Image (cartoon, rainbow, N blue to C red):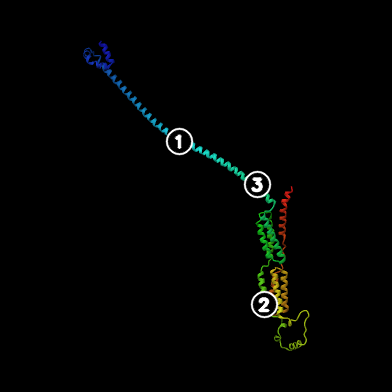
Amino acid sequence: MSRMSQDNSTLDPAAAKANAPDTAPTRSKTASPQQAPRRGGSVALALSLSLVAIGGAGYVGWRQYTQETGVLDAVHATASLDTRVANVERTLEAVDNERNLLRQRLGDADQVNRSLREELLGQAERTRNLEDAVAKLSDKTLSGHDGMLLDETESLLRMGKERYALFHDAQGAAAAYALADQALAAVNEGTFSSLRQSINAEREALTKSQPAAQMAALDALTQLRAATAELPLKPLDTPADNQSADTWSRIRRALTSVIRVQRVNSAPLAVADARFARELVGLDLAQAQAALLAYDGQSYAAALKRADANLATQFDSQVPAVQQARTKLTALATQFQPATPVELGAALSELRNLRSMHTLKPAAEAKP
């Protein structure tokens, strides 16, 4: 029984402690010297086991703490990920909505572009048809505006030609040609553009044929007409009291009261009126002025020649005033020589030919 109790005590320390008061006298009585070390080893073992148990419990607690901490971190991370995922989902939904709107707008823009393209194609076709109609219309006949301008141009060219032929008015004819060039410049038909060169050539020829100092010549003739009234006649036309009182003069005066000798073709200057001689010179100078205004060079030169002849035959050539008048007439006659007549009518003929060709062209195209 004692061995069994020892074995039980060694195997179960708690039971040994519980039964220690009861068995202490007997253990102390029956204990041997070899049982003391065994009790110390069991205590050490128990302590080591308890330390191991404490260490295992601490390890297990630490593991549980770390697991709980990791779980909390994972929960927080999962919550943040859920939030981010929710934000991303909302963003994707917004992007999808915007993409749908863009698709809708692109669809609307495509429809608008198709409609605009169709309208542009329609407009292009209408423009092409309009251009064809205008081209056909311009090929068939001239417009009313161009026809009116061409009629005006032809009238001005004919007017300038007739004015130069009738009145030798180069300045007026040149002005008519300038107006004709302006009217022709407003014509839209390009066929008549080459005609302006012919018009300008004839106008330049008319401008060059005009005298350079017409007004100065007119003023000089006017001064000569005014000075003619004061020019002295020949001595034979002077009064009797101004003649010399010698013997032969007294005999001549005595005979003239009885016998008078005169020429048949021209009256003597003693009998002719002095005003008649001055009026003849004035009329010649006036005719020279009229010829100068009419640009008639031949009549102008003939009138100056007659005026100079009258001054030479009827006025005193020894007086300086008469000499100066004749010198001025000679200068005026040499200054304005008869210019070469300008040949007009080429531009008018060219205009008529172009108009006839342009009128016959549509008729020739209509026959086939």
Q: Provide the residue designation for mark 1.
A: 90
Residue in the picture at 71% in, 59% down: 348
Q: Are marks 3 and 1 in contact (CB under 8 Å)?
A: no
Residue type highlighted by circle 2:
Ala
Residue type highlighted by circle 3:
Asn
Q: Is residue 286 visible?
A: yes
In the drawing, does residue 182 fall left or right of residue 90?
A: right
Q: Provide the residue designation for mark 3.
A: 129
- What percent of the width, then of the height, locates residue 141? 69, 52
Where is residue 243, by image quadrant? bottom right
Q: Residues within 10 Å of mark 1 (few under 14, many from 20)?
A: few
Q: Residues within 10 Å of mark 3 (few under 14, many from 20)?
A: few
Point out the frontmost of discs 3 and 2: 3
- What percent of the width, then of the height, locates residue 313? 73, 78
Q: Provide the residue designation for mark 2.
A: 227
Residue reaching furthest to the right: 264
Q: Name the N-terminal-most of marks 3 and 1.
A: 1
Q: Secondary structure at mark 1?
A: helix
**Above/below status of 270 relative to 128:** below
Q: Secondary structure at mark 2?
A: helix
- What percent of the width, then of the height, locates residue 42? 28, 17
Image mark for residue 198: none
Residue reaching furthest to the top: 1
Q: Name the N-terminal-most of marks 1 and 2.
A: 1
Where is residue 33, by image quadrant? top left
